Amino acid sequence: MKTYPTAISLFEKVLAIQQRLLPSNHQDLTKTYYNIGLTYYAIDNYQNAISYYEKACTIHEKDLVANGSSLANSDAISYYRKAIAIEEKILSLDDPSLETIYNNVAVAYDCVDDKQNALLYHQKALAIREKALSHNDPALASPYRNIASIHHSMNEYSDAWNFYRKALAILEQTLSLDDLSLGKTYNNIAVAYGSMDGKTNALLFYQKALAIQEKIFSPKDTSLVPIYTEDIFGTQLNFENEKTWCSQAHLNHQLGYVYSHKGDYTTALSHYQKALEMEQNYVAEDDSSLATTYKNIAGVHHSMGEYSSALSFYRKALHADHPLLDTTYNNLGSVHSSMGDYVAALDFYKTTRAMREKSLPPNHPDFGTIYNTIGTAYSSLGNDPTALSDYQKTLKIQGKILPSTHVDLAISYGNIGIIHSSMGNHLKGLAFHEKSFRIREISLPPNHPDIAINYNNIGSVHNTMGNYTTALSFFQNFTNIYDNLGSVYNSMDDKSIAQSYYQKAFDIRQHSLGENHPEMANSYDNLGTIHSSIGDKSKAHVCYEKALEIQQKSLSNNHPDLVNTYNKIGLIYHSIKDYTKHYHFYKKLSISD
C-alpha cells in the first residue's frame, strides 16, 4: 500500500511536465491519466479513479471525431469498461452518469463493428432513461433511434422498424411537422420498410421526408450533402449539414428514384439528368462524386431496355468511381446479361468477386449474391453443373447467416430447382421448387408476385413431365402467368385458348413496359408461333418481324433468340414459296452463326 502514494506522486509529476509541453488532447496524456486512475482504483479511491479515466476517455472521443481510428476505438472501449466497473460499484444502477458512459461505450463498440455489444450498452442506457422519464418524453427518441440503427445494421429489420416507430410516435407529438429530425426519422423508417420488401410504405415515408426538405431548403441552398446509391431501399438519405453541391440536385435524386420504383422511368430519367446537370456545375465530369449519379441514370436505361445507354453511363461511373467499383462491375455484368452476352457478363461478375475477395470475409453475404449471379450466367451459357455448384455456394452462405424462412433462401432453392430440372432431374427440381414455395407461402402475402414465380416453376416442371392437368392447376393459381398457360395449351394442341392467353400476356406487357421493351419480343414470338401453327402465315410474319425489330435493338448479333427469329421468318418465306427472301434470311442465319 505504501508504494501507491509514491506512484501517484510520480505520475502526477510526469503529468505536470506533459501538460506544459504537449497539447491538451495529445494521446500521451491518456496513458498518464489512465495510470493515475488505475493506481487510485487499486487503493479503492473510486471517485478519483473515475475522474482520471474520464479525462482519458475525453481525449479519445476527440481523437475519434478527428480520425476515427479502430485503435482509438479499442482503447476507448478499454477505458470506458474500467470506468463502468468503478461507477457500477459506487453508483446506483439507474444513475444518469452511468447512462452517459453506457452510451459512449456503445458508440465505440459500433465503430469497431461489434454490433452485439453496441446493442447491449445502448439497451442499458435506454433502461436508465426510461426509468427517469415519462413514456413519451422527447429525450427517449434518440436512444430509440440508436437501437433501431443497430438492429438495421444487423439485418434485423422488423426490430429496427419497431424502434423507429417508437421514436416517430414521440417526435410527431413534440416537433413541428417540418422539423428536420422528423424528416430523418421518416427516412429511416423508409429504409427499414424497403429492407423488408415493403416498397409501397417505403415510398410513402421517403415522400414524407422529401416534403420536409422541400419546405426547409431553397433551390440554391448548399447545406446538404447528398449520398445516394442505385438501390434506394438499401440506402439512407443524408440530412446532415456539410459542404456539398446543391440541394436542388439532392431533391431531384430523391424524385428520380421515387419515380423509378413506381415504374415511371421517363420521369425518373428526367430528374436524374437534372441532378447531373446541377452537379456538373460544381465538379469535373470524371469526379468520383458523380459515380452514383451515372449509375442511377444507367439503372433507369437498363430498366427501359436501353442497354447501350446503360452501358455508356456505367462506364462513366467506372471511370469516376472509387469506393464502389465492384458494384459498377457487377452492374455492367447485369446489362451484358440482359443483352444475352453472357460471356462478357461472366467476366464482369468474376471481376466483382475477385475485388470482394480482397476486402470481405469468405462468408460475407455479398458472396452469396455474387455466386448467384455467376451461377445464373453459367446457366444461361448452358453450363448447368458449374451453375449448380455456384448456386449451392450461395445456399451454403445463406444457410449460415439467414433464418430458415428468409425469402433469399427461396430464391436459391428455386434456382437450384431450375438447374436440376434442366439437367433432367425433374423430381429433384420439383423438390427444391416446393421448398422455395413453402418459404414464400410463410413469409409473403398470398398475392405477392414472387409466389407467382413458384407457381410458374412448379407448373413448368409438371408441364415438362407431361402432367398437363397438374401444370394447369399451378399456372392458374396466379392468373397473370398467361405465357405459361398459353404454352401448356399449345402443348395440348388447344391453339385457340393458347392464343387468348398469349394475347393477354401481350396486352399486359404492352401496357406496363411499352411497345419497344425487350420482353415484348417474347410476346410477339409467342403470338407468331400460334398464328403459324394454325396456318395464318401473314399474321405470323408480322409478329416475327416485330420481334426481330426489337431484338435487333437489344441483343447481340449471335444471340440465340435472334437466330431463332431469323429461322422462323425464313421458314415463313419458304412456306409461301418466296425463295429469294427465304435465302436472304438463311444467309443472315449463317452470318449470325
Image (cartoon, rainbow, N blue to C red):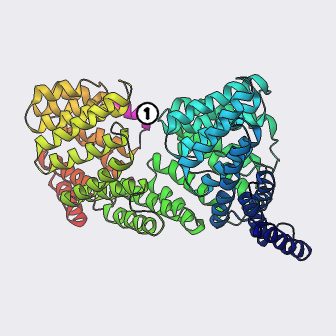
Q: Main secondary structure of the magenta part?
A: helix
Q: Residue at x 31, y 65 (%)?
A: 343
Residue range (magenta): 507-516
Residue at horizontal 13%, vertical 50%?
Answer: 574
Instruction: Name the residue rendered at 66%, 35% in the picture.
Output: 126
Whole-percent x and y of residue 301? 50, 50
Quadrant hosting residue 62: bottom right
Please give left or right for residue 411 compared with residue 105 in the image: left
Q: Where does label 1 land, which residue?
A: 512
- Above or below, 300 against 328 in this view is above
The foreground one among 68 and 243 is 68
Q: What residue lies at 35% left-to-right and 55% top-to-bottom?
A: 373
Looking at the image, can residue 278 be seen? Answer: yes
Where disc 1 sits, the SS reads helix
Q: Is residue 528 above or below residue 45?
A: above
Q: Quadrant of the C terminus?
A: bottom left
